[in-house]
Image (spheres, grey):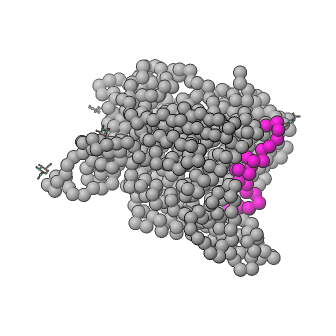
Amino acid sequence: MKENGASSELFPRTAVCHWKTLVPITLTMLATLSYAMALFYQSGQFHLIAPVKNVILPPKILPRGQFSLDQSQVPRTPGTQLAALDQNLLLKTWDKTVFNDVDSTAYKNIEVVNSTGRGTSMELTSFKMTHVELVSHVGRSIKVGDVLHYRIQSRDFNGRKRILGGDMWYATLNSDKDPKASTAGHVVDHGNGTYDAYVLAAWPGNAKFNLILVHASEAVYHLRNIVWNSERRAIWLGRYSFKGKTTDAVCYLQHHGKWEGKCEYPAYRALGSTVFLCDKKPDFPCESLYALNIHRQATSNRAKELGNGMEYLYKRPYFEQGVPVTNSTLRIEGSGLEHNKLPRCKADQPIPTIQGYWMNDKWNSLLCEFGTWTEKSSLTSCLRGQRLVILGDSTMNQWLNGLIKLLDTATVDKPGKRLWSKMHYDSLNLTLYFQFHPYVIGSHTYKLNEMREEVDVLNGLNDADCNYVVVISPWAHFAQWTRDSYIERVRLIRKAVIDLRHRCPDIPFVIKGPHPRDHKSWEAAMFISDYILTQIETINREAFGGIGAFFLPIWDMNLAYPARKNVHMPMTVIMEELKMFVGYVCDTLHPH
Ligand SMILES: *[C@@H]1O[C@H](CO)[C@@H](O)[C@H](O)[C@H]1NC(C)=O
Ligand SMILES: *[C@@H]1O[C@H](CO)[C@@H](O)[C@H](O)[C@H]1NC(C)=O
Ligand SMILES: *[C@@H]1O[C@H](CO)[C@@H](O)[C@H](O)[C@H]1NC(C)=O
Ligand SMILES: *[C@@H]1O[C@H](CO)[C@@H](O)[C@H](O)[C@H]1NC(C)=O
């Protein structure tokens, strides 16, 4: 079971990550479509009505000592909202984070350079030369509850102002001790080389503003236009076994184009027009394929091919560099943040731009009001008689282990298989079912007969009593899929969720979002870039919007947590994620 730790790492763990300060991101968060969305699933029709918000409002400073969930003072990334019918939903999702509405007046402050001036060349954005300044609190003390506004002027390595937007940044506010606290900020891209970062002064005492240049916009461009659209970024070794003999073959997913001499393993209901293909081997019938593992060498070669000439974008000094910030150390006055009563958590929850903050190893969510259910007695009474279906990857396996710990109750069977496990707690009449999704990107040998598609699991949930709780979390193993194949797959899962809703309208359905991760090499920084993960979050939010599902964003809490970012975060983080998950699930199952 532990071996499920197979992560989506492409490459062996060797290099040590160079940064220690953990910094947070700001997902270029689009105004989510989820609010103002009306869904009529009885009729099978979905209507998305999204407000158009192109205007950045000047941030207002919050009154001291209180924090209102109305985060309208934090501008969301402007972008074109698409009102879409379900058919073309998702097709343009990813564009929205990239193309802001700007006009030529945005460029008015750009310095004109001539040959006697600074130079005649333009370099990429430099972490060293980029200028960051606190603009909201000049000559003014900072109070708990204030939103700090930093202006970022990107400059190239020669000190020239950059004209191009699109750089990816992580902004956080941290305090190592007295108190131990941290939060992730929100970055707005003006599309002209200027950015604004907003962070919440959530605690009294010390704080330090940190800014990381994650990717230069040239890397984002390369990722979005070349890497993400390129097929065969994950290559597997398929194992055939026939008449006592075995052999290995190269396998991959293909969406476009032709093929020849392949064994075909289509799964239309789960993958649509994407087909899993393996080289046909003489003397081995296609049906004799029984296991897969990732083909590291071939995958790495593919990375070298796609990154040829662009490697530098994924290495220092262009990748994940801390920006020196003058006067980054702050003093926040006042007493603790008073949370105005947050709204109760509900399906299709709008997601605020500032999601919460860490204080003494506890995550204080600003998403919505979660009930407290992690005590053994409340958790066991909440989940009694339920079947908890957990679909995902090794990060979901961490959730499973955390839940087992919280339940602290004897189970009759121990998990055994690598890719799935089913545990029944007789005393609680509770079943925990965990299933890894197929096409695992990991170096263990994964048996095909242990794999099940999410859609098949969801379609199999057909007991009339509907005592199901479902959580899914597709992300880590999908950064190496093309955007089109991923979107197609997610749309089919969405369809299965809608069908499940018809059978069981009220079951709690949760989607856990992605979080930033480690990268051991430039190839990994490119193939499983955090940029692609942010886009997967965007796609998932939209894909599961408007169908009575609860999207649990964990990006900011993971980013803000003061530890090196890793695909497998420490138990402290997992437990805070679970606190929100069971809070939502149990409030839904047992409303008071
Ligand atoms: C970029 O656009 C923003 C918002 O319109 C503006 O405040 C800023 O001055 C512009 N920066 C430059 C360098 O023109
Ligand atoms: C070139 O730039 C320098 C410095 O900004 C300025 O003094 C000079 O007048 C400029 N020359 C021309 C021809 O524009
Ligand atoms: C930064 O800090 C220095 C020394 O603490 C101070 O003299 C200076 O005025 C500060 N600069 C700004 C822009 O606040
Ligand atoms: C146990 O749970 C299942 C599934 O939720 C339910 O159908 C069954 O009635 C329960 N059995 C008892 C004895 O409560």
Q: Left or right? Give the position of 250 relative to 563.
A: right
Q: Nearer the viewer, residue 439 or 286?
A: 286
Whether residue 415 is situated above or below residue 173 in the rendered picture: below
Q: Is residue 454 magenta?
A: yes
Q: Nearer the viewer, residue 530 or 280?
A: 280
Q: Looking at the image, which residue is at 73% across and 54% down?
A: 452
The quarter holding residue 35 reads top right
Q: Left or right? Give the position of 118 relative to 573.
A: left
Q: Quadrant of ligand 1?
A: top left
Q: Left or right? Give the position of 334 relative to 406.
A: left
Q: Looking at the image, which residue is at 46% across and 45% down?
A: 96
The quarter holding residue 140 reads top left
Q: Is residue 576 magenta?
A: no
Q: Nearer the viewer, residue 32 or 313?
A: 32
Whether residue 334 is situated above or below residue 413 in the rendered picture: above
Which of the image's four quarters has the C terminus? Answer: top right
- Magenta stretch bounds: 444-466
Q: Looking at the image, which residue is at 48% across and 23% down?
A: 67
x and y percent of residue 242 in the render? Answer: 78, 74
x and y percent of residue 325 in the render? Answer: 34, 40
Is residue 13 visible from the viewing direction of this image? no
Residue at the far bottom in the pictured view: 282
Q: Nearer the viewer, residue 79 or 293?
A: 79
Q: Looking at the image, which residue is at 56% across and 24% down?
A: 342
x and y percent of residue 299 in the render? Answer: 56, 66
Q: Left or right? Give the position of 578 relative to 171.
A: right
Whether residue 322 is situated above or below residue 243 in the rendered picture: above
